[in-house]
Amino acid sequence: MAKSAAHRGGRLTKEELKHDTFVETAAKVESYYESHKQNVWYAVAAAVIVIVGVMGLTRWMGSSAKAESFELMKAKTSYGQHNLGDAQAKFQTVQNDFGGTAAAEAQYYISRIKFDQGDYTGAASGFEACVTNYSPDQETLEASFAGWAAALEASGKDAEAAAKYEETANKFPQSAFAPEALTQASRLYLKLNQNDKALAAVDKIVQKYPESQAYNKARTQVDQLR
């Protein structure tokens, strides 16, 4: 993936924030997140719908747990096809009909849809709600923190975003996303002329994540900031 404008040291436009900060940032945690879920959600959902039929499959699946998984698959299929209005309606149906982790995952995707539509304030509130008002599993919780930080930045709240990126790394220190979150925090702290905080963030990468892709750049920054 090409380096983002942020990594080049350039100023971020709102459009770059949408395609750089969230896509570069949340896509990485999304990859980690999706690797812990059932494989080929979209392909399976499409094939099952064609072969069996929506109503027939729902009756065949029977249990509530399987039903909520199927409803989530349908919503994710719409999202993957960029039918955002239809996807949002389906995710809201999941929230209305089911609770627990399914409702939390639906809330996460509803927040992503708001981000995709340019409603960054609404997205930030949505991700916050997923964290505080729902019961997400570990992967959805981590993805929500990442999305929350990206939405705050896209809203122009750099200080809050930097703190949220750092909080994400601190809450999920074993995550593959943690060094990236610290990189984003450091970038924003530098933008805010808070060099001590920027140094602390990249120094943590050097100390804790020597095998990460962020390590070499972080080591250079540590030398420059000291």
Image (spheres, grey):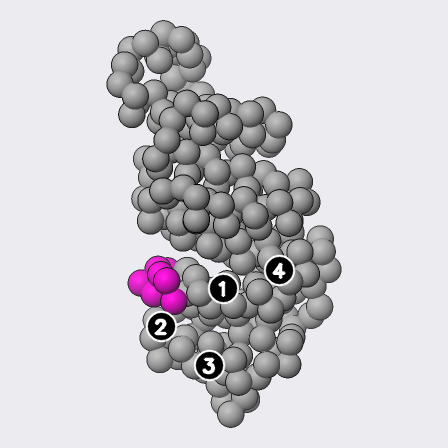
Which numbered dot is residue 209? Answer: 2
Q: Earlier in the sequence, mark 2 or mark 3?
A: 3
Q: Earlier in the sequence, mark 1 or mark 4?
A: 4
Which residue sits at x=35%, y=13%?
58
Label 4 crowd bin: few (<14), some (14–19), many (20+), radius 10 Å: many
Label 3 crowd bin: few (<14), some (14–19), many (20+), radius 10 Å: some
The chief SS type of the magenta part is: loop
- Cα gap from disc 4 to disc 2, whole angstroms: 24 Å
Of 6 and 145, the residue lying toward us: 145
Which numbered dot is residue 153? Answer: 4
Q: Which residues are magenta?
A: 170-176
- Cα gap from disc 1 to disc 4, whole angstroms: 10 Å
Give the labeled residue for mark 1: 165
Which image quarter: residue 187? bottom right
**What kind of residue is marked 1?**
Tyr
Which numbered dot is residue 200? Answer: 3
